[in-house]
Image (cartoon, rainbow, N blue to C red):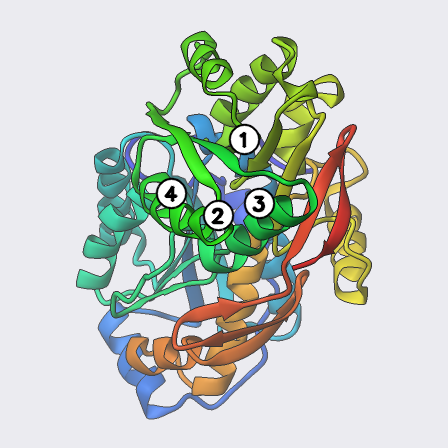
């Protein structure tokens, strides 16, 4: 039986000790390298590898929290059954990364001071990443960031493996221009760094097709009154609305978009979009809605089939649906395992150097990380009721 998750305000683990114990199996014996002994002395570590999962479990992106937590738990269970990371049994603690970045930083500082974390996995907004990376890297803790993001992360000690506009948005924009004859674009996103930076890139890609941007706006996180935005979109008469809203903000916007009749005449292209968000939007409001991602549950691959079988076996048939955002926390831990095996140590510098140039395999299949940039298979899909129907690899 799984325990109820709560979200303490002072940075304590979200998962109770009883559940954390259930995520661990005895690790295999292994001879430690000199780097590992130095790592253990510096961090005060024992045989456990203490990983902090900073996952949005509240606020607009909190919709991805249940799947992300489950996916991380599944990866930990699998890795520990194989003997852990370089012989260290993983002990996972989940912390809420929702809310204002300064509050998440306070939780992180509390966690590092009290829980002696060895490594951080992050599934949260880029605004939180920019705030967290300062305090995490100052404490010389490796930081793996798994969310779709704007690209360009080069901070020492940080590896980002999510989809970026160059590989996610550019081919989608070209396809919509070529196949659906889209030339007029309206951009709407949440008011923080990922939409800001992504839209800069998107404008270049639209220009490549000969198209034009007929409107752009950024919406405060948590905004659910969309009538003014929809009125401006209707007046601008775009062929496509590119949506960089996140979580529940995307859900409420897309519901309103469908309910006001715009879905029948105007295409939509979602950025941070997956089956969890689509379930909230509803089948009646998903007409002409497209999404590009490195992962969809409908991808017909052995790696994905095996992942979903193990996910359902561990969490049951009524578990939170799997989507690209939540599933990425599984990818982050598989990257960690591959990088540690390559480096032969958990010390930060050699571990991060290995993580920036490695090939790992997760539910997405093989992912190649070169110079800190993840390259994975990418797919364009169209909403079909409450599922995404794959159109083509891009």
Classify mark 3: residues with Cα within 10 Å, few (<14), some (14-19) or many (20+). Answer: many
- The first of marks 3 and 4 along the sequence is 4
Q: Which mark is residue 199?
A: 4
Instruction: Kindly check if marks 2 and 3 are in contact, taking CB atoms under 8 A apart as contact.
Output: no
- The first of marks 2 and 3 along the sequence is 2
Mark 2 lies on a secondary structure that is loop
Mark 4 lies on a secondary structure that is helix
Q: Which residue is painted at 33% across and 61% down in the image?
A: 152
- The first of marks 1 and 3 along the sequence is 1
Q: Which residue is painted at 81% across and 54% down in the image?
A: 309
Q: 10 or 285, which lies in front?
A: 285
Q: Quickly name the residue at label 1.
A: 63
Residue 151, given in percent of the width and then of the height, sits at 38, 58
Classify mark 4: residues with Cα within 10 Å, few (<14), some (14-19) or many (20+). Answer: many
Instruction: Kindly check if marks 4 and 1 are in contact, taking CB atoms under 8 A apart as contact.
Output: no
Q: Is residue 7 left or right of residue 280?
A: left
- The first of marks 2 and 1 along the sequence is 1
Q: Quickly name the residue at label 2.
A: 210
Instruction: Kindly check if marks 3 and 4 are in contact, taking CB atoms under 8 A apart as contact.
Output: no
Classify mark 1: residues with Cα within 10 Å, few (<14), some (14-19) or many (20+). Answer: many
Q: Quickly name the residue at label 3.
A: 326
Q: Judge depth for marks 4 and 2 and give the one in front.
A: 2
Q: How far is mark 1 from mark 3, CA to CA?
A: 9 Å
């Amino acid at each position: 039986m799984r325990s109820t998750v709560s979200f303490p305000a002072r940075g304590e683990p979200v998962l109770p000790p009883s559940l954390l114990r259930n995520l661990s199996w005895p690790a295999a014996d292994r001879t430690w390298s000199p780097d590992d002994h130095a790592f253990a002395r510096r961090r005060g570590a024992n045989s456990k590898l203490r990983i902090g999962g900073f996952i949005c479990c509240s606020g607009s992106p909190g919709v991805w929290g249940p799947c992300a937590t489950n996916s991380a738990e599944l990866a930990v269970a699998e890795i520990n059954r194989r003997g852990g990371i370089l012989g260290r049994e993983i002990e996972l603690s989940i912390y809420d990364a929702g809310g204002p970045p300064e509050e998440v930083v306070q939780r992180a500082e509390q966690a590092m001071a009290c829980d002696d974390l060895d490594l951080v996995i992050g599934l949260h907004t880029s605004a939180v990443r920019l705030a967290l990376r300062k305090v995490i890297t100052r404490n010389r803790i490796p930081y793996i960031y798994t969310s779709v993001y704007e690209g360009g992360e080069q901070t020492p000690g940080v590896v980002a493996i999510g989809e970026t506009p160059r590989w996610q948005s550019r081919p989608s924009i070209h396809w919509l221009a070529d196949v659906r004859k889209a030339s007029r674009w309206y951009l709407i996103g949440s008011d923080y760094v990922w939409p800001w930076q992504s839209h800069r890139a998107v404008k270049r890609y639209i220009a490549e097709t000969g198209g034009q941007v007929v409107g752009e706006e950024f919406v405060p996180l948590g905004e659910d009154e969309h009538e003014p935005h929809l009125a401006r979109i209707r007046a601008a008469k775009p062929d496509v609305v590119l949506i960089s809203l996140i979580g529940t903000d995307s859900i409420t916007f897309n519901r309103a978009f469908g309910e006001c009749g715009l879905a029948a005449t105007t295409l939509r292209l979602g950025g941070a979009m997956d089956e969890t968000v689509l379930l909230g939007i509803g089948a009646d409001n998903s007409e002409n809605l497209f999404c590009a991602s490195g992962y969809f549950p409908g991808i017909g691959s052995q790696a994905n089939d095996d992942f979903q079988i193990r996910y359902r076996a561990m969490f049951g048939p009524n578990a939170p649906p799997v989507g690209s955002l939540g599933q990425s926390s599984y990818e982050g831990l598989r990257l960690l395992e591959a990088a540690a095996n390559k480096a032969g140590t958990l010390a930060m510098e050699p571990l991060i150097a290995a993580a920036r140039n490695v090939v790992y395999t997760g539910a997405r299949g093989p992912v190649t990380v070169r110079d800190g940039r993840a390259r994975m298979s990418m797919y364009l899909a169209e909403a079909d009721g409450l599922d995404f129907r794959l159109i083509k690899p891009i």
